[in-house]
Amino acid sequence: MYLLPQPNKIELLEGEFGLRYNSCIVIAGEIPADMVSDAFSHAKLLQKELKEVTGFTFSIIRGKGNTEKENREAGNILLTCEAGKLPKFKKSQEAYSLKICESGVVISGSAAAGILYGVQTLRQIIRQSGMVLPCLEIVDAPKISCRGLSYDVTRGRVPVLEELKRQADICSFYKMNELQLYVEHSYLFRDFSEVWRNNTPLEAQEILELDDYCRRLHIDLVPSLASFGHLYEILRTKTYAHLCELEGSDTEEHSLIGRMAHHTVNVSEEESFAMVTSRIEEFMGLFSSRYFNVCADETFDLCKGRSKALGEEKGVKRVYLDFLKRLCDFVIRKGKIPMFWGDVLLEKPELLKELPEEAVCLNWEYSPEVTEDNVRLLTDAGVKNLYLCPGVQSWNHFINKHSDAYRNIAGMCRNAHKYHVKGLLNTEWGDLGHIAHPEFSTIGQIYGAAFSWSDVIMEEEDVNRAISVLQYGDESEEVVSLFRDLADTECVSWWHAVQYKENMLSAPEKWKPDNMLTAKNPEEMLHQNEELQSRLYKKLYQLPEGRKADVCAYILMGEGQRLLTMTVKALCDFQAHRSLSCDGKALAGQLESWLMEYKKLWRSTAKESELFRIVEIFSWYADRLRDC
């Protein structure tokens, strides 16, 4: 039996407990009145799971008092609370115990969150055992207090509300308690119509509803707003271009590559601070969280343009720190705790001591070869509130690089446990239009959840088998490995595809099509891609109805990888021989037919947002094929 995260303590007992059609989910009478609403919400999650797995709808009832004895006689599932009584975990609000005996089931939480996590564990058992449950006893609590996901909802793909709720559901199922929405320009800010007029931004009601939804799952929905760098879409408008560090930002052509590298706000202009803080104040009012992430990462342009003189006077890092400190102080005055990305100050960590003590430093690192260098540097500098932030490796790929994600996340989680940090924030980014389907980040999301709650870092194949069963209902336990292997047939990354399209006219000597091929033997990769797609097609009939769409998405994006590789190979042939080794018009038609299906996949989880930019890129490649 698989459980993710793995419990701190689990003891398998003799015997089994069989649910019956008339079994009930009992909310213990001893649960305090102010906790009954939460307990009822968690009971409904369990009721829904049982309905989907068994077909029976189990009634939810209220017990009379301390009903454990009553429950054992009745053969029910009891939800109760033992505040401060769970051994070893007296201070944890998320601790729980789960006891399955031959006469019934008892879930006891130290608080409402503990009850929820006991329910989530029982749901995983039910997925594997149905109505006949193995007798066991679990006592469990998290090793790291804050376990979250940062989700990019701004650089191309703006999710619909139901997709955001789905993300929250996955977080909760695997015992994560924090979700950050990263926004640059994709919220309907008042007086910013010039910024969002060509987009389909998130609106206030959607965020308010999501915040309420997350609270019921004991998830802290944290606002994350670009407030220093990464203000490209704002600072290239007619209204705000004068606040950009670089001059002429409102006259240049739009560039997905440029959006990743520019633009930073001009900190020498006081109006910049007023603009940024007005956005912070408007955005923070939508969230119940006591935290606010001002971001402040990757300020690549700082002191290279309009604030150059200020940088020469004070030093670039001092200019950066002064503005960040003002942002943090503003957030604190508004009653919130600031968070910020720590990458800019890694070169001068001693400056971190000047920031407010309560501020939370977020240290990202995305290499599969994780070291301890940064976390040691920050802890030695006296940073007390530190999150480590790995990534699900979604950006710039058709399919997430799951193997790289495993190595990166596992390594960062090891460091998080070793250095006893405050939190583990897994990250999902949407560089260059956010081409990858959101579902593909689920696997990396689970890695982070499992390895932050528990300090047991499972081997990659073992955790992949567990995810195959728990998330995808695959009894053969192999579907996640197939997803990983399909991703590894990539020969042309999305990064290279966009770079070539945007730069080949201005620098043709640098951006040649053969520079895009990352595989030594593309023909072999194409063959493996087709073989893996075939295996996934065969897998479809074996999986539960609710999971088939996920596999279909992998197949579709695997085909996108294949067609892009064939396109680039054709362009290489034309450059070398002035002729194609394939029918360019036919391949262009295949690419466009695939694009039509991709648009359907996009719209299944996202607003229209910046889909048109993705369409433009594929259309451009199809036109190149026809020109050859």
Image: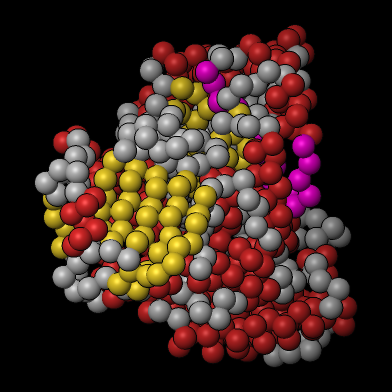
Residue shown at 38% from the left, 53% from the top = 98
User: In which image quadrant can residue 55 be found?
Assistant: bottom left
Image-based side of 270 in relation to 164, left or right? right
Counting from the top left corner in percent of width and height, residue 411 is at 71, 47
Q: Is residue 578 magenta?
A: no
- In the displayed structure, 308 sits above or below 504; it is above
Q: Is residue 147 above or below residue 78?
A: above
**Location of residue 578 (image quadrant):** bottom right
Q: Nearer the viewer, residue 612 or 385?
A: 385
Q: Which residue is depicted at the point 75% across and 52% down?
A: 368
Residue 530: give x, y in percent of width and height: 66, 86
* Magenta-drawn stretch, dominant element (helix, strand or loop): loop
* Number of numbered discs overlaid on the protein picture: 0
Query: Can I make out residue 579 in this image?
Result: yes
Q: Measuring 47% from the left and 42% from the top, which residue is drawn there?
A: 141
Q: Residue furthest top?
A: 313
The residue lying toward the viewer, choosing from 94 and 202, is 94
Can see residue 560? Answer: no
From which residue to which does the magenta span run?
358-372
Image quadrant for the C terminus? Answer: bottom right
Left or right of residue 494, residue 606 in this image? left
Q: How is the image coloured?
A: secondary structure
Look at 68% across and 18% down and name the residue there: 382
Q: Nearer the viewer, residue 25 or 301?
A: 25
In the depicted structure, whether residue 61 falls above or below residue 547: above
Q: Position of residue 618 (x, y in %)?
A: 59, 70
Is 370 included in the stretch rendered in magenta? yes
